[in-house]
Image: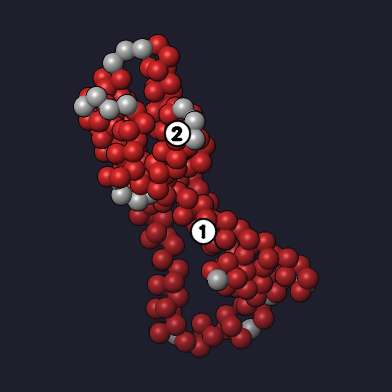
């Protein structure tokens, strides 16, 4: 629904400057891009939940292995004790192990499925330990410390980008605030934007460039935080 609404809005804006067939194409492309953007946002939220639950997950595996349980049973404990979405993901891991998959291969499949890098590190750690030997609990404990350090660095990067995000939000809201004030103080002048064809074209151009600017700022800030 959001994609259709955005596509229809861009169709109306493009119709002020371009022909109807080209406006329809722009509206459809906009709708598809918005739907993909919404799905990407949901996937990012899902990944962030998994990452935030990862230290507790690893610590639970450490406690289980120190109690003498094998890795497969430690994963079963994670599936029973952890909340969503780790609960559902480790149920799949436990089921794959029950079908004959090794624990490290099941974790690696989880990494490919979710895109969470830390689970690839977890898989490599367990795979190397199972082939070379050693104390599994201490190895996983070291992994837990690495994961916590990565989360601290990520949180610090988000905090450093907070000022840029606040500036972007203010810049995005400011045109609407200024337009509302102008409409209250001088409604006749603002009505030209909707009644005069020339002003309507200018409004369409301004709206498109405004949206492109907001998307560009968001992309730059997100890219810097991700790196």
Q: Residue at x 72, y 70 (%)?
A: 24
Residue located 25% across and 30% down the image: 64
Q: Is residue 198 above or below residue 82?
A: below
**Can residue 148 be seen?**
no
Q: Where is residue 2, by image quadrant?
A: bottom right
The disc label shown at residue 38, or none = 1
**Residue 72 placement, left or right of 208:** left
Determine whether the residue tagged by mark 1 lies in a helix, strand or loop: helix
- Secondary element under disc 2, as helix, strand or loop, is helix
Outermost bottom residue: 188
Measured from the top left, where is residue 164 in percent x and y?
38, 49
Residue at 51% x, 82% y is 190
Q: Which residue is mark 2?
A: 97
* Quadrant where the C terminus is found in the figure: top left
Q: Is residue 40 left or right of residue 50?
A: right
Left/right placement of residue 37 relative to residue 118 reads right
Measure how far apart labels 2 and 1 are at the Cα level.
Answer: 33 Å
Of labels 2 and 1, the one closer to you: 2
């Amino acid at each position: 629904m959001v994609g259709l609404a955005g596509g229809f809005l861009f169709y109306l804006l493009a119709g002020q400057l371009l022909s109807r067939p080209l406006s329809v194409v722009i509206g459809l492309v906009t709708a598809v891009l918005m739907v993909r953007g919404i799905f990407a946002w949901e996937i990012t939220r899902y990944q962030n939940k998994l990452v935030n639950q990862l230290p507790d997950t690893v610590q639970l595996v450490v406690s289980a292995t120190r109690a003498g349980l094998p890795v497969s049973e430690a994963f079963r404990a994670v599936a029973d004790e952890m909340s969503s979405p780790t609960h559902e993901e480790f149920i799949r891991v436990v089921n794959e192990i029950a079908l004959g998959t090794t624990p490290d291969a099941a974790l690696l499949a989880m990494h490919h499925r979710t895109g969470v890098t830390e689970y690839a590190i977890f898989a490599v750690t367990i795979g190397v330990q199972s082939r070379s030997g050693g104390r599994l609990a201490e190895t996983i404990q070291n992994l837990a410390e690495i994961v916590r350090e990565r989360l601290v660095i990520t949180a610090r990067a988000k905090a450093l980008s907070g000022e840029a995000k606040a500036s972007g939000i203010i810049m995005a809201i400011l045109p609407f605030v200024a337009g509302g004030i102008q409409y209250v103080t001088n409604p006749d002048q603002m009505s030209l934007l909707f009644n005069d064809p020339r002003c309507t074209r200018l409004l369409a151009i301004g709206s498109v460039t405004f949206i492109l600017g907001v998307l560009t700022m968001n992309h730059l800030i997100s890219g810097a935080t991700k790196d």
